[in-house]
Image (cartoon, rainbow, N blue to C red):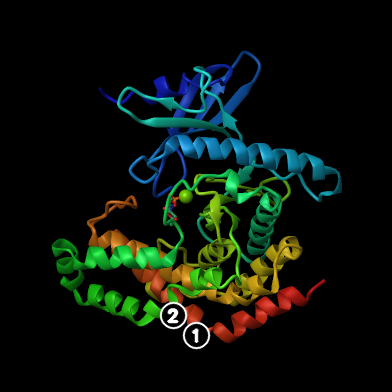
Amino acid sequence: MAAPSLEEVAARFEVPGRLVMIAPTGQGNVNDTYLAVFRTAFSEHRAIIQRINTRVFQRPRWIMANLRVLTEHVHKRIEREAAGSDRIWQLPRVIPCKNGRDYYRDAAGGYWRALTLIASAASHERAQGAEHALEAGSVLGQFHHLVSDLSPRKLRDTLPGFHRTPEYLRRYDRTAAGAAGASRLRASSESRRLGAFIEARRPIAGVLESALERGELALRLIHGDPKVSNILIDDLTGKGTSIIDLDTVKPGLIHYDFGDALRSIGNPAGEETEDLSQVRFDTELCEAFAKGYIARARDFLTPGDRRYLYASIRLLAFELGLRFFEDHLAGNRYFRVSSGEHNLRRARVQFRLCESIEAREKSIRAVLDSAFSRP
Ligand code: GN1
Ligand code: MG
Protein backbone atom coordinates (compact mmCIF):
# COMPACT_ATOMS: atom_id res chain seq x y z
CA MET A 1 0.00 0.00 0.00
CA ALA A 2 1.15 3.51 -0.76
CA ALA A 3 2.00 5.84 2.11
CA PRO A 4 -0.78 8.36 2.86
CA SER A 5 -0.46 12.04 2.07
CA LEU A 6 0.64 14.37 4.86
CA GLU A 7 -2.83 15.94 4.83
CA GLU A 8 -4.40 12.54 5.43
CA VAL A 9 -2.04 11.90 8.31
CA ALA A 10 -2.67 15.30 9.92
CA ALA A 11 -6.44 14.68 9.82
CA ARG A 12 -5.99 11.64 12.08
CA PHE A 13 -5.07 13.61 15.17
CA GLU A 14 -7.22 15.38 17.73
CA VAL A 15 -6.38 18.93 16.74
CA PRO A 16 -9.23 21.43 16.42
CA GLY A 17 -9.78 23.20 13.12
CA ARG A 18 -8.89 22.68 9.49
CA LEU A 19 -5.38 21.98 8.30
CA VAL A 20 -3.99 24.98 6.41
CA MET A 21 -0.35 23.95 6.13
CA ILE A 22 1.98 21.04 6.78
CA ALA A 23 5.67 21.31 5.95
CA PRO A 24 8.98 19.75 7.00
CA THR A 25 10.68 21.36 9.98
CA GLY A 26 13.98 20.84 11.83
CA GLN A 27 17.12 19.05 10.72
CA GLY A 28 16.69 15.65 12.35
CA ASN A 29 18.96 12.86 11.18
CA VAL A 30 16.53 10.06 11.96
CA ASN A 31 12.75 10.76 12.12
CA ASP A 32 10.70 12.82 9.59
CA THR A 33 9.33 15.94 11.29
CA TYR A 34 6.59 18.31 10.09
CA LEU A 35 4.92 21.41 11.41
CA ALA A 36 1.14 21.47 10.91
CA VAL A 37 -1.06 24.54 11.26
CA PHE A 38 -4.80 24.21 11.85
CA ARG A 39 -7.36 27.02 12.00
CA THR A 40 -10.82 27.40 13.41
CA ALA A 41 -13.10 30.43 12.97
CA PHE A 42 -11.46 32.00 16.01
CA SER A 43 -8.07 30.38 16.70
CA GLU A 44 -4.97 28.68 15.36
CA HIS A 45 -3.43 25.40 16.54
CA ARG A 46 0.04 24.22 15.68
CA ALA A 47 1.30 20.70 16.10
CA ILE A 48 4.45 18.73 15.41
CA ILE A 49 3.75 15.61 13.39
CA GLN A 50 6.43 12.95 13.03
CA ARG A 51 6.93 9.68 11.28
CA ILE A 52 9.04 7.48 13.52
CA ASN A 53 11.96 5.89 11.72
CA THR A 54 11.18 2.25 12.38
CA ARG A 55 14.47 1.04 10.97
CA VAL A 56 16.12 2.78 13.90
CA PHE A 57 13.34 2.52 16.49
CA GLN A 58 12.01 -0.98 16.07
CA ARG A 59 9.51 -0.73 18.95
CA PRO A 60 7.60 2.50 18.21
CA ARG A 61 4.85 1.52 20.68
CA TRP A 62 7.40 1.44 23.46
CA ILE A 63 8.44 4.95 22.51
CA MET A 64 4.90 6.17 22.84
CA ALA A 65 4.36 4.35 26.13
CA ASN A 66 7.57 5.92 27.48
CA LEU A 67 6.45 9.34 26.31
CA ARG A 68 3.19 8.99 28.26
CA VAL A 69 4.93 8.01 31.50
CA LEU A 70 7.60 10.66 31.09
CA THR A 71 5.42 13.61 30.18
CA GLU A 72 2.78 12.87 32.81
CA HIS A 73 5.46 12.72 35.48
CA VAL A 74 7.26 15.83 34.30
CA HIS A 75 4.15 17.94 33.80
CA LYS A 76 2.96 17.13 37.31
CA ARG A 77 6.31 17.97 38.80
CA ILE A 78 6.59 21.23 36.88
CA GLU A 79 3.21 22.26 38.23
CA ARG A 80 4.07 21.19 41.77
CA GLU A 81 7.22 23.30 41.71
CA ALA A 82 5.87 26.22 39.67
CA ALA A 83 5.41 28.58 42.60
CA GLY A 84 9.10 28.51 43.54
CA SER A 85 10.40 28.55 39.97
CA ASP A 86 12.01 31.40 38.04
CA ARG A 87 10.19 30.40 34.82
CA ILE A 88 7.56 28.16 33.29
CA TRP A 89 9.39 25.02 32.20
CA GLN A 90 7.80 23.22 29.29
CA LEU A 91 7.81 19.80 27.68
CA PRO A 92 5.69 18.74 24.68
CA ARG A 93 2.68 16.54 25.27
CA VAL A 94 1.34 13.74 23.08
CA ILE A 95 -1.71 14.69 21.01
CA PRO A 96 -3.91 11.60 20.77
CA CYS A 97 -5.04 10.12 17.53
CA LYS A 98 -8.76 10.08 16.74
CA ASN A 99 -8.72 6.28 17.12
CA GLY A 100 -7.95 6.75 20.80
CA ARG A 101 -4.33 5.63 20.52
CA ASP A 102 -1.18 7.68 20.87
CA TYR A 103 -0.09 6.95 17.34
CA TYR A 104 -1.48 6.38 13.88
CA ARG A 105 -0.32 3.42 11.83
CA ASP A 106 -0.77 3.99 8.12
CA ALA A 107 -1.58 1.33 5.54
CA ALA A 108 2.07 1.19 4.47
CA GLY A 109 3.14 0.37 8.05
CA GLY A 110 4.41 3.86 8.95
CA TYR A 111 4.05 5.03 12.55
CA TRP A 112 2.97 8.63 13.03
CA ARG A 113 2.50 10.70 16.16
CA ALA A 114 1.62 14.27 17.00
CA LEU A 115 3.03 16.46 19.74
CA THR A 116 2.18 19.89 21.03
CA LEU A 117 4.44 22.65 19.73
CA ILE A 118 6.42 24.69 22.23
CA ALA A 119 5.48 28.04 20.71
CA SER A 120 7.49 31.28 20.71
CA ALA A 121 10.72 29.39 21.24
CA ALA A 122 13.68 28.76 18.97
CA SER A 123 16.42 26.21 18.68
CA HIS A 124 19.84 26.77 17.17
CA GLU A 125 22.17 24.45 15.32
CA ARG A 126 25.16 26.04 17.04
CA ALA A 127 26.02 27.90 20.22
CA GLN A 128 25.09 31.58 20.00
CA GLY A 129 27.40 32.62 22.85
CA ALA A 130 27.98 32.10 26.56
CA GLU A 131 24.50 33.12 27.60
CA HIS A 132 22.98 30.56 25.25
CA ALA A 133 25.33 27.89 26.60
CA LEU A 134 24.36 28.76 30.18
CA GLU A 135 20.67 28.46 29.33
CA ALA A 136 21.28 25.15 27.58
CA GLY A 137 23.02 23.88 30.72
CA SER A 138 20.06 25.00 32.83
CA VAL A 139 17.64 23.18 30.55
CA LEU A 140 19.56 19.88 30.72
CA GLY A 141 20.07 20.23 34.49
CA GLN A 142 16.39 20.98 34.97
CA PHE A 143 15.41 18.00 32.82
CA HIS A 144 17.60 15.69 34.92
CA HIS A 145 16.13 17.25 38.04
CA LEU A 146 12.56 16.73 36.83
CA VAL A 147 13.12 13.04 36.12
CA SER A 148 15.36 12.40 39.13
CA ASP A 149 12.38 11.01 41.09
CA LEU A 150 11.02 8.87 38.25
CA SER A 151 12.24 5.29 38.50
CA PRO A 152 14.27 4.29 35.41
CA ARG A 153 12.47 0.94 35.59
CA LYS A 154 9.25 2.63 34.51
CA LEU A 155 10.68 3.28 31.03
CA ARG A 156 11.61 0.72 28.42
CA ASP A 157 14.86 0.65 26.53
CA THR A 158 13.68 1.98 23.16
CA LEU A 159 17.03 1.61 21.44
CA PRO A 160 19.22 -1.14 22.90
CA GLY A 161 22.89 -0.26 22.87
CA PHE A 162 22.20 3.42 22.29
CA HIS A 163 24.90 5.27 24.25
CA ARG A 164 27.01 2.40 25.33
CA THR A 165 30.26 3.28 23.63
CA PRO A 166 31.83 -0.21 23.77
CA GLU A 167 28.86 -1.52 21.80
CA TYR A 168 29.47 1.03 19.05
CA LEU A 169 33.06 -0.11 18.96
CA ARG A 170 31.98 -3.74 18.56
CA ARG A 171 29.61 -2.76 15.78
CA TYR A 172 32.41 -0.78 14.10
CA ASP A 173 34.67 -3.84 14.30
CA ARG A 174 32.02 -6.00 12.66
CA THR A 175 31.42 -3.48 9.89
CA ALA A 176 35.13 -2.89 9.27
CA ALA A 177 35.67 -6.65 9.03
CA GLY A 178 33.01 -7.12 6.33
CA ALA A 179 34.02 -6.96 2.68
CA ALA A 180 32.28 -3.66 1.86
CA GLY A 181 33.34 -2.01 5.15
CA ALA A 182 36.95 -3.10 4.77
CA SER A 183 37.14 -1.76 1.23
CA ARG A 184 35.64 1.61 2.26
CA LEU A 185 38.09 1.75 5.16
CA ARG A 186 40.99 1.33 2.73
CA ALA A 187 39.47 3.55 0.06
CA SER A 188 41.24 6.83 0.93
CA SER A 189 44.03 8.10 3.13
CA GLU A 190 41.46 10.15 5.07
CA SER A 191 39.42 7.06 5.81
CA ARG A 192 42.56 5.18 6.93
CA ARG A 193 43.48 8.13 9.15
CA LEU A 194 40.06 8.01 10.85
CA GLY A 195 40.49 4.26 11.32
CA ALA A 196 43.84 4.88 13.02
CA PHE A 197 42.26 7.58 15.20
CA ILE A 198 39.78 5.01 16.49
CA GLU A 199 42.49 2.42 17.13
CA ALA A 200 44.46 4.89 19.24
CA ARG A 201 41.42 5.59 21.45
CA ARG A 202 40.07 2.10 21.79
CA PRO A 203 41.01 1.97 25.49
CA ILE A 204 38.81 4.97 26.40
CA ALA A 205 35.59 3.48 25.01
CA GLY A 206 34.69 1.67 28.22
CA VAL A 207 35.41 4.49 30.66
CA LEU A 208 31.78 5.06 31.74
CA GLU A 209 30.60 1.47 31.47
CA SER A 210 33.42 0.20 33.67
CA ALA A 211 32.71 2.92 36.24
CA LEU A 212 29.12 1.68 36.23
CA GLU A 213 30.28 -1.91 36.75
CA ARG A 214 32.46 -0.82 39.66
CA GLY A 215 29.48 0.92 41.24
CA GLU A 216 30.98 4.40 40.89
CA LEU A 217 28.13 5.52 38.65
CA ALA A 218 24.46 4.59 38.73
CA LEU A 219 21.78 4.17 36.07
CA ARG A 220 19.24 6.98 35.93
CA LEU A 221 16.95 8.35 33.29
CA ILE A 222 18.69 10.16 30.48
CA HIS A 223 17.45 12.26 27.57
CA GLY A 224 19.77 10.52 25.13
CA ASP A 225 20.04 13.29 22.55
CA PRO A 226 20.54 16.68 24.24
CA LYS A 227 22.35 18.30 21.33
CA VAL A 228 22.03 22.07 21.11
CA SER A 229 19.29 21.97 18.48
CA ASN A 230 17.05 19.98 20.82
CA ILE A 231 17.12 22.73 23.44
CA LEU A 232 14.56 25.49 23.10
CA ILE A 233 15.14 29.09 24.08
CA ASP A 234 12.11 31.25 24.79
CA ASP A 235 11.79 34.12 22.27
CA LEU A 236 10.15 36.36 24.84
CA THR A 237 12.49 35.96 27.81
CA GLY A 238 15.70 34.64 26.21
CA LYS A 239 15.70 31.84 28.78
CA GLY A 240 15.82 28.13 28.18
CA THR A 241 12.33 26.68 28.31
CA SER A 242 12.25 23.10 27.04
CA ILE A 243 14.10 20.11 25.69
CA ILE A 244 12.55 18.22 22.80
CA ASP A 245 13.15 14.96 20.90
CA LEU A 246 12.20 12.58 23.68
CA ASP A 247 12.42 9.23 21.89
CA THR A 248 15.64 8.19 23.55
CA VAL A 249 14.66 9.03 27.11
CA LYS A 250 15.52 5.78 28.85
CA PRO A 251 17.68 4.29 31.59
CA GLY A 252 21.35 5.20 31.16
CA LEU A 253 24.23 7.23 32.53
CA ILE A 254 23.60 10.96 32.75
CA HIS A 255 27.21 11.41 31.68
CA TYR A 256 26.23 10.46 28.16
CA ASP A 257 23.87 13.45 28.23
CA PHE A 258 26.37 15.82 29.78
CA GLY A 259 29.06 14.84 27.28
CA ASP A 260 26.71 14.86 24.31
CA ALA A 261 25.35 18.32 25.12
CA LEU A 262 28.88 19.67 25.47
CA ARG A 263 30.34 18.04 22.37
CA SER A 264 27.51 19.88 20.62
CA ILE A 265 27.27 23.29 22.27
CA GLY A 266 31.01 23.47 22.94
CA ASN A 267 31.81 23.32 19.22
CA PRO A 268 30.91 26.75 17.82
CA ALA A 269 31.49 25.57 14.23
CA GLY A 270 28.64 23.05 14.57
CA GLU A 271 28.63 19.38 13.68
CA GLU A 272 27.87 19.91 9.98
CA THR A 273 30.73 22.29 9.17
CA GLU A 274 32.94 21.48 6.20
CA ASP A 275 35.76 23.67 7.46
CA LEU A 276 37.80 21.51 9.82
CA SER A 277 40.03 24.43 10.76
CA GLN A 278 37.05 26.05 12.52
CA VAL A 279 36.39 23.06 14.74
CA ARG A 280 37.51 23.44 18.33
CA PHE A 281 36.22 22.96 21.83
CA ASP A 282 35.48 26.31 23.40
CA THR A 283 36.20 26.31 27.14
CA GLU A 284 34.22 29.50 27.75
CA LEU A 285 31.09 27.92 26.32
CA CYS A 286 31.89 24.85 28.39
CA GLU A 287 32.20 26.93 31.54
CA ALA A 288 28.88 28.68 30.92
CA PHE A 289 27.10 25.40 30.17
CA ALA A 290 28.56 23.72 33.25
CA LYS A 291 27.53 26.66 35.43
CA GLY A 292 23.94 26.43 34.19
CA TYR A 293 23.87 22.65 34.51
CA ILE A 294 25.44 22.35 37.91
CA ALA A 295 23.25 25.05 39.43
CA ARG A 296 20.27 22.77 38.73
CA ALA A 297 21.98 19.41 39.20
CA ARG A 298 24.08 19.97 42.31
CA ASP A 299 21.61 18.18 44.58
CA PHE A 300 21.68 14.89 42.78
CA LEU A 301 25.28 14.77 41.52
CA THR A 302 27.51 12.49 43.60
CA PRO A 303 31.31 12.79 43.98
CA GLY A 304 31.51 9.75 41.66
CA ASP A 305 29.45 11.60 39.01
CA ARG A 306 31.75 14.58 39.26
CA ARG A 307 34.83 12.50 38.66
CA TYR A 308 33.67 11.41 35.19
CA LEU A 309 32.42 14.67 33.73
CA TYR A 310 35.56 15.51 31.79
CA ALA A 311 35.83 11.92 30.53
CA SER A 312 32.25 12.11 29.28
CA ILE A 313 32.90 15.15 27.09
CA ARG A 314 35.88 13.54 25.41
CA LEU A 315 34.07 10.23 25.12
CA LEU A 316 30.96 11.62 23.44
CA ALA A 317 32.88 13.45 20.73
CA PHE A 318 34.71 10.17 20.10
CA GLU A 319 31.51 8.11 20.23
CA LEU A 320 29.59 10.26 17.75
CA GLY A 321 32.57 10.31 15.37
CA LEU A 322 32.74 6.53 15.69
CA ARG A 323 29.01 6.21 14.94
CA PHE A 324 29.24 8.45 11.88
CA PHE A 325 32.31 6.66 10.59
CA GLU A 326 30.80 3.21 11.16
CA ASP A 327 27.72 4.33 9.23
CA HIS A 328 29.95 5.56 6.42
CA LEU A 329 31.66 2.17 6.25
CA ALA A 330 28.27 0.44 6.39
CA GLY A 331 27.00 2.40 3.38
CA ASN A 332 24.99 5.13 5.20
CA ARG A 333 22.15 3.07 6.57
CA TYR A 334 21.42 4.92 9.81
CA PHE A 335 21.91 8.69 9.58
CA ARG A 336 20.24 10.71 6.86
CA VAL A 337 22.92 11.87 4.40
CA SER A 338 23.06 14.34 1.55
CA SER A 339 26.04 12.72 -0.18
CA GLY A 340 28.10 9.56 -0.04
CA GLU A 341 30.85 11.27 1.96
CA HIS A 342 28.56 13.06 4.40
CA ASN A 343 29.07 10.70 7.35
CA LEU A 344 32.82 10.68 6.73
CA ARG A 345 32.87 14.48 6.93
CA ARG A 346 30.78 14.42 10.09
CA ALA A 347 33.17 11.90 11.65
CA ARG A 348 36.16 14.11 10.86
CA VAL A 349 34.50 17.00 12.68
CA GLN A 350 33.88 14.96 15.83
CA PHE A 351 37.40 13.52 15.84
CA ARG A 352 38.93 16.96 15.41
CA LEU A 353 36.75 18.13 18.29
CA CYS A 354 37.90 15.17 20.37
CA GLU A 355 41.54 16.17 19.77
CA SER A 356 40.73 19.72 20.80
CA ILE A 357 39.10 18.46 24.02
CA GLU A 358 42.17 16.36 24.75
CA ALA A 359 44.47 19.33 24.18
CA ARG A 360 42.42 21.43 26.62
CA GLU A 361 41.92 18.77 29.27
CA LYS A 362 43.52 20.81 32.05
CA SER A 363 41.45 23.93 31.49
CA ILE A 364 38.26 21.93 31.01
CA ARG A 365 38.82 20.19 34.35
CA ALA A 366 39.49 23.58 35.92
CA VAL A 367 36.29 25.18 34.62
CA LEU A 368 34.26 22.17 35.75
CA ASP A 369 35.77 22.42 39.24
CA SER A 370 35.11 26.11 39.43
CA ALA A 371 31.48 25.61 38.35
CA PHE A 372 31.08 23.31 41.36
CA SER A 373 32.71 25.72 43.75
CA ARG A 374 30.16 28.47 43.02
CA PRO A 375 27.26 28.70 45.44
C1 GN1 B 1 20.64 11.78 15.65
O1 GN1 B 1 17.85 12.45 14.57
P1 GN1 B 1 18.54 13.43 15.40
O2 GN1 B 1 19.19 14.47 14.58
O3 GN1 B 1 17.67 13.99 16.51
C2 GN1 B 1 21.01 10.70 16.66
C3 GN1 B 1 21.81 11.28 17.82
C4 GN1 B 1 23.03 12.03 17.30
C5 GN1 B 1 22.57 13.10 16.33
C6 GN1 B 1 23.72 13.86 15.74
C7 GN1 B 1 18.37 8.20 17.65
O4 GN1 B 1 19.70 12.64 16.23
O5 GN1 B 1 22.25 10.26 18.68
O6 GN1 B 1 23.76 12.61 18.36
O7 GN1 B 1 21.80 12.51 15.26
N1 GN1 B 1 19.80 10.06 17.16
C8 GN1 B 1 19.66 8.73 17.17
O8 GN1 B 1 23.26 14.96 15.06
O9 GN1 B 1 20.55 7.99 16.80
MG1 MG C 1 17.32 12.87 18.12
Task: State the residue in front, 149 or 334.
Answer: 149
Note whether ligand 1 is within 8 Å of mark 1: no
Answer above or below: position of 341 versus 244. below
Answer above or below: position of 72 versus 300. above
Q: Secondary structure at mark 2?
A: helix
Query: Residue 160: percent from the left, percent from the top?
Result: 42, 52
Most extreme residue toward the top is 41
Note whether ligand 1 is within 8 Å of mark 2: no
What numbered label is drawn on residue 47? Answer: none
Task: State the residue in front, 270 or 28.
Answer: 28
Most extreme residue toward the front is 214
Q: Residue at x 49, y 82 (%)?
A: 358
The amino acid pointed to by label 1 is Ala
Q: Residue at x 57, y 19 (%)?
A: 39
* Residue corresponding to mark 1: 359
Q: Secondary structure at mark 1?
A: helix
Q: Residue at x 62, y 81 (%)?
A: 365
On screen, residue 286 versus residue 50, left or right, reads right
Query: Residue 266: percent from the left, percent from the top?
Result: 55, 69
Answer above or below: position of 114 versus 29. above
- How many numbered markers are drawn? 2
Can you say which quadrant of the picture contains the C terminus? bottom right
Which of the 4 quarters of the picture holds residue 297?
bottom right
Most extreme residue toward the right is 83
Query: Residue 237: percent from the left, percent from the top?
Result: 73, 49
* Residue corresponding to mark 2: 355
Tell me the distance, in whole angstroms, between the alpha carbons under discs 2 and 1: 6 Å
Verify CB contact (< 8 Å) between mark 2 and mark 1.
Answer: yes
Can you say which quadrant of the picture contains the N terminus? top left
